Each structure stands twice: as C-alpha cells, then as structure tokens.
Image: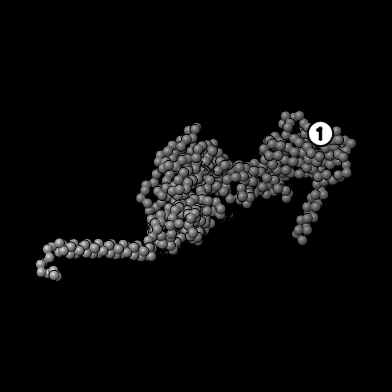
Amino acid sequence: MQNLIQSVLILMAVLMSTRGAEEVVYTQVGDSITLKPQVMDHSQKYYWHWSFGNVELASLNPYGKHFSSDKLWKDKLSLSDDSLTINNIQQEHFGKIVCDLRLNRITKETTNFHILKISVTMKPPSPLLPGEYLSLACDAETQNNQRPQIHWLNPQGMVYNQFPVQATRQHHGQWTCVVINNGKENKAKVSVTVVDLSPAPSRPQYTSKVSPLNVPCSIPDDISWEQIKARDIQEVHWDFFPKSGSNLPSERLFSLSLNNSLTWNPDQNKGLKPAKDPKTKNLSLTKRLGREEGRGDYVCTLKFKSGRTLSSTVHVEVMQIVSSPGTDLISGQQVNLTCSFGHPLPSDLQLKWTPPARSSLIPDPHRAHLILPAVWTGDGGRWKCELQQNTTLLAWAVIDLKIEPKLSLWMLAIICSVTVIVILLLIFVIILYRRRQRKRRHLRHRLCQCKNPKPKGFYRT
Ligand SMILES: *[C@@H]1O[C@H](CO)[C@@H](O)[C@H](O)[C@H]1NC(C)=O
Ligand SMILES: *[C@@H]1O[C@H](CO)[C@@H](O)[C@H](O)[C@H]1NC(C)=O
Ligand SMILES: *[C@@H]1O[C@H](CO)[C@@H](O)[C@H](O)[C@H]1NC(C)=O
C-alpha cells in the first residue's frame, strides 16, 4: 500500500514537472555535469536554448551548434542532441541554468536546473600517517530549505560516517560523499592518502646456502617519495634481528641518505645488496646465496620527525638437509634425510625431493623426512630438496652423500679361502723342498761309503 502511494506521488511529481520543470543538480568544484531536460513531445524538432542569467550558453538548431564566447564558459561546454555537458565546474558556475525548447520562436518547454554545490573538507589535508586522526565533512547547499540526505562511502564502497577515524592503510583511497535529493544520487569524491609501506609477506622468505635470499620492502605504487618527504621523514633504515636462541647481536644493515640522490649507506651489509634505485620505491635487499646465520627478522623502517615510525618485518628461514648418520656412508646402511626450515612448514607449501640421477631409490618425494632403508653406491651424489608453492620454486637445499662399497660376506670368504690356499701351498712347497734336500744328503752319504776301501776278505774268491 505504502509502495503504491509512493509510486503515485513520484508519478505526480513527474507529471507536474513537465512544463517549467525544476531540477536540482549537486556537484563539486572541478567535476563535470550533464544536464538533460525531460522532453514531453519527441515528435517536434525543437530549437534548444541554454542560458545562465542573461548569458546565452549554447544553442542547438537544424543549422548547427552555437556556444557562448564568454570567457567564464568558453571551452567548458559541449552539446549532444538532448543534453548539455559542463566540464570542470568552477565556483562561478553554480546557480540556475535554463533550458528552453522553442518552436517558431515560442518557448514550448522550460527546465530550470539549479546547480548546487557540495563542499568536501578533509582534516588534516592528506597525506596522513597510520594512527593519525582523519575527519571528513560534506556540506550541500539547499534549495527551498530542502535538506538532502548525506552519507559517506569509504574506499571499499561501504557506508561510513564515524569521524574522526584513526587512519590505517584501509582508509587510503577515494572516499565518496553521496548526496541524495528527491531520490537522485549525486556524488563528490575526495582522495585520502595514508602513507605506509607495502605489507610484508605473511609467511617467511626461504633461502639456503645454495639458493638466493630476497627480503622485500617497498613503498606502494600510489604513494610518492614527495608525499613521504612532505611528512618530514627523518630516517630510512634496515635492521637485522637474529632468530631468538642464537647469541648473535642485532645489527643495523643499511641507512638511506635522504638528500636528493637517495643512496644507501652500508653499516653491516652481511653480503646483502639493496635494490638498485631507491627512487623507484623498491627498498628490497637481496643476496646471491643465503647463510645459516642469516636466519631471523629483517626490519625496514621509515622514521618521521614527529616520532612516528612505519616498519615492515620480513622473517627469513634457512633451509638445510640433515643426514643421519652423516654424509660418509657405506653401502647397505640405513640413512635418514631431513629437509628442515627451523619451524613447521605452512600447509600451502610443498616439498619435492630429487635423488641423484643414478639412484634407483624412489622415496616418497613430498615428505620432509626421508628414510632410505639401505643405500648403495649409485645413491651417492647430490640430493636436492625443493620448496614450492603450487608450481613456483621458492628455495632449495642440497646435500652430497659419499657411499663406499662394503665387503660382503662371500667376498670375505673368498679372500679368506684364497689366503688359506696360498698358505697351504707355501707350506706344501716348503715341505717338498725340505724333503728333497734331505734325500739328496742321504744319497751323497751312500756314495761316500762306496768310495771308502772295501774290507778285504769280503770279496768272493
Ligand atoms: C625490487 O628489487 C629486487 C632486486 O633488485 C627485485 O628482485 C624485486 O623484484 C623488486 N621488487 C619490486 C616490487 O619491483
Ligand atoms: C631413521 O628414522 C627412523 C624412524 O624415525 C628411526 O627408527 C631410525 O633409527 C633412524 N635411523 C638413523 C640411521 O638415524
Ligand atoms: C595455488 O595454491 C593456492 C592455495 O594453496 C590455491 O588457492 C591456488 O588456486 C593455487 N593456484 C594455482 C595456479 O594452482
């Protein structure tokens, strides 16, 4: 029932506004508006006349278009078949614009457009630092004491009216003041800048002795160095805090000199290299290969003269492969390989093992802990453990296993038997030799007896 009454009211309003119609248009300085009168009788070829006070703004007839040469309006107007567009509205353009549709010099239809101003104020003027208070206010002029409804939309497009608000990065962007008059929405926009660093990666950065290290830090694309300098920046630096439990001290790695050239000065660079040109707002550090002592937190800080600081912390983990019982092995031995990160692996990351090419072992390639029940010489060489997210390789680690062949039982048996045979042979040869010597001595002895003179009388006569 209520809906029906509303529809009837709207219909009546439309009907009443046909001749000498009044329209209210809200806009803000700098915006553009398009005015389009309602035409009742489309069958007529009207002459269109647009005016502001006694200035003829534009006209449209079968012979062409004509625009005012008044310097306040020049180059600001454009006409289509049924509307007038005013670009880059200035303070002086607010007021009443009349559109007459004429036939034979007689006005048939008139529309009065009341151009009313929306004023938006922002306190303090941008840019803000996170934690500072932001106030936005939106004011709209009124026509016949008809107060329009006003509300704000935040950069995410949600209604938001609680000011002042403590600024966060979420508040950065375009806010919209919505002015609703007679059911018609008019919008005024304002850009709020909240200076901040790009968010640090939510999970650790991985590296190893054989894979590179990348420690990201950057200023978002939509914030310029000029905006940061406008807030009186005092220092930009990188610090390193070793993983708790290690006895290493924390250290300042780099400081940025904030003169016109913006250059990094190393304090304790630890083999790290800053991205080439800080002017590009890329403040990342990189290193060709990681090191175990590089495990810990890397903090990128912007410090302002007001005492406020912005910082982003990157956790760095070092991958390594541990072999139990070691890397010098004998074939047949059981070996456990563990790919470790110093903390449990996030579930969105996967591991992949690659054994040496000649290895015939096909272990479960996605487990951090590999149990190789027995290794053979072919399993010797480089084992690789890769850390992947979907198919992107994040980091990898390697270990070199040396595997010596083992003397097996039957080989031992052969060696022993050969030794025994050799010894037996030797003994046999010695015995043989000795025997022969003894025989020869015996013979010589008999020969000698023969030479001796035979006892007489022993001869047979
Ligand atoms: C920043 O620079 C580093 C090293 O030069 C590069 O690896 C990285 O991709 C850059 N980051 C961005 C966001 O451009
Ligand atoms: C390998 O791991 C298994 C199970 O965790 C364990 O029983 C075995 O003793 C380990 N072997 C070595 C050589 O560390
Ligand atoms: C990557 O993984 C994430 C979750 O682990 C998933 O949401 C996403 O769709 C994957 N992307 C591709 C390209 O597979």
- Is the CB atom of the residue marked by disc 1 within 8 angstroms of ligand 1's nearest atom? no
- Please say whether residue 324 is visible from this viewpoint: no
Q: Position of residue 312 (x, y in %)?
A: 48, 47
**Residue 257 drawn above or below residue 130:** above
| Towards the viewer: 316 or 241 | 316
Residue 41 placement (x, y as % from top left): 86, 45
Q: Residues within 10 Å of mark 1 (few under 14, many from 20)?
A: some
Q: Position of residue 333 (x, y in %)?
A: 40, 61
Return the residue found at the far front.
461
Residue in the picture at 10% in, 67% down? 456
Q: Which residue is mark 1?
A: 65
Location of ligand 2 given as a quarter of the image: bottom left
Quarter of the image for residue 86 reads top right
Q: Is residue 318 visible?
A: yes
Q: Residue at x 47, y 35 (%)?
A: 263
What's the coloring here? one colour
Residue visible at 75% across and 59% down? Answer: 2
Q: Secondary structure at mark 1?
A: strand
Q: Residue furthest right?
A: 104
Image quadrant where residue 93 sits: top right
Q: Position of 47 compared to 312: left or right?
A: right
| Residue 422 sits above or below residue 249 on the image | below
**Which residue is more in the foreground, 238 or 445?**
445
Q: Quadrant of the N terminus?
A: bottom right
268 or 306, which lies in front? 268
Compared across the picture, whether 184 is left or right of 65 comes to left
Q: Amino acid at mark 1?
A: Lys
With respect to residue 181, does 55 lie above or below?
above
Q: Quadrant of the C terminus?
A: bottom left
Residue 53 lies, in percent from the top left, at 76, 34
Residue at image position (70%, 48%) is 185
